């Protein structure tokens, strides 16, 4: 099968490309390299992975990339939730409009199957925790969350109206090698700049689920192989949580630096729109026969080790 992966040169996308190729599939990557890197996919031969440099805001380019495609994995988006506190139209364009262009290009090209990287942030500050897929109403509190919820609506409406089939994945925080953003990445950069102190945004008690990126890519493919309703919606997480305070401690332990003072800026959240506590119910994922290799804390330690190496903390 020939798969189109939007954002395939990004952090999660490039691991998904690796898994698809390992399973014998051919892949076309569509990416504008705004936060992705071509080197993340350059180990693959051009007969396995074809790279299309293009922007999802260019509908014509998206339509051309659909030629011969059996299934679309739509991962491209602005990855930075915090950006919405300063720039208010990025998620609208890179999330909502980009997703419209993807489903519209599929309609115009007759491609039917799409998997989408949504997020736990669609639940907002959910009253029920762990939060199951059928929790509602969905009231996201970030602009990024609003664009993910809009993306889900576009997929389900194109499914209802034009006969698409969709797999919606509501990700926990995804961590691992090749990470280019997120809390572990930020902590390592802060320690590289100053190894005597580590500033943590908020009071450190924010608590979320973390999933390792290879587990995430394997889980996505596993669910697409198992679930064949018109609309398939799954939380992807590891079944537990970890606090930001514990992440800071793990990163400091793995850094090998002694006498690091961990300092908290205070408040219950890192920034306006940050959800202080998120825990996904993963019963549906586990009942499908998938079990992740790492729990949250193990995924964080594994990631800290990989990123300390990649970032060159001690260089
Ligand atoms: P990433 O920034 O590494 O990947 C996004 C990719 O999309 C990049 O390669 C970027 O160059 C590309 N891209 C962005 N805008 C584009 C555009 N207009 N046209 C073409 N390409 C474009 O981020 P990631 O962490 O790998 O995230 C992948 C997806 O998973 C995103 O949709 C993100 O919202 C979602 N997600 C990530 C997490 C997480 O913890 N990392 C959690 C929930 C959801």
Image (cartoon, helix red, strand yellow):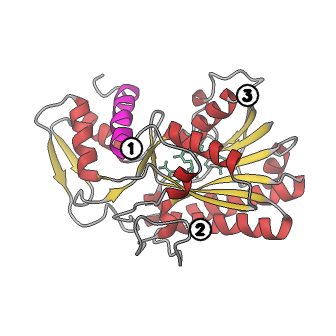
Q: Residues within 10 Å of mark 1 (few under 14, many from 20)?
A: some
Q: Is residue 81 above or below residue 54?
A: below
Question: Image check: 248 left or right of 43?
Answer: left
Residue range of the region highlighted in magenta in the rendering = 296-311
Which image quadrant for residue 101?
A: bottom right
> Closest to the observer: 62 or 67?
67
| Residue for badge 1 | 295
**Main secondary structure along the magenta-highlighted residues:** helix
> Magenta span has 297?
yes
Question: Image check: 182 left or right of 171?
Answer: left
Asked if disc 1 is less than 8 Å from ligand 1, the answer is no
Is the C terminus in the top left, top right, bottom left or bottom right quadrant?
A: top left
Identify the element where label 1 is drawn.
loop
| Residue for badge 3 | 24
Q: From the image, state whether disc 2 or disc 1 is nearer to you.
A: 1
Q: Earlier in the sequence, mark 2 or mark 1?
A: 2
């Amino acid at each position: 099968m020939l798969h189109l992966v939007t954002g395939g040169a990004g952090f999660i996308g490039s691991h998904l490309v690796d898994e698809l190729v390992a399973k014998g599939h051919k892949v076309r990557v569509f990416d504008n390299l705004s936060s992705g890197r071509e080197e993340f996919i350059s180990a693959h031969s051009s007969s396995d992975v074809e790279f299309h440099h293009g922007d999802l805001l260019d509908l014509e380019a998206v339509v051309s990339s659909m030629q011969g495609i059996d299934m679309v994995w739509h991962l491209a988006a602005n990855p930075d939730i915090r950006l919405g506190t300063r720039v208010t139209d990025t998620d609208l364009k890179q999330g909502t409009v980009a997703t419209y262009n993807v489903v519209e290009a599929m309609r115009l090209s007759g491609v039917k199957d799409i998997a989408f990287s949504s997020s736990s942030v669609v639940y907002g500050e959910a009253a029920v925790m762990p939060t199951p897929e059928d929790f509602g109403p969905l009231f996201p509190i970030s602009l990024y969350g609003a664009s993910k919820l809009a993306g889900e609506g576009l997929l389900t409406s194109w499914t209802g109206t034009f006969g698409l089939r969709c797999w919606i994945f509501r990700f926990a925080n995804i961590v691992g090698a090749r990470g280019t953003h997120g809390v572990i990445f930020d902590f390592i950069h802060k320690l590289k700049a100053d190894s005597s102190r580590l500033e943590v945004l908020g009071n450190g008690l924010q608590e979320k689920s973390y999933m390792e990126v290879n587990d995430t890519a394997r889980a996505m493919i596993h669910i697409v192989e198992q679930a064949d309703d018109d609309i398939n919606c799954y939380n992807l997480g590891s079944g537990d949580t970890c606090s930001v305070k514990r992440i800071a401690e793990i990163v400091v332990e793995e850094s090998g630096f002694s006498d690091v003072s961990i300092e908290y800026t205070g408040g219950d959240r890192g920034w306006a729109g940050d959800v202080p506590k998120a825990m996904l119910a993963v019963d549906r994922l586990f009942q499908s026969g998938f079990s992740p290799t790492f729990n949250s804390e193990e995924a964080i330690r594994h990631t800290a080790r990989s990123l300390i190496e990649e970032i060159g903390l001690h260089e």
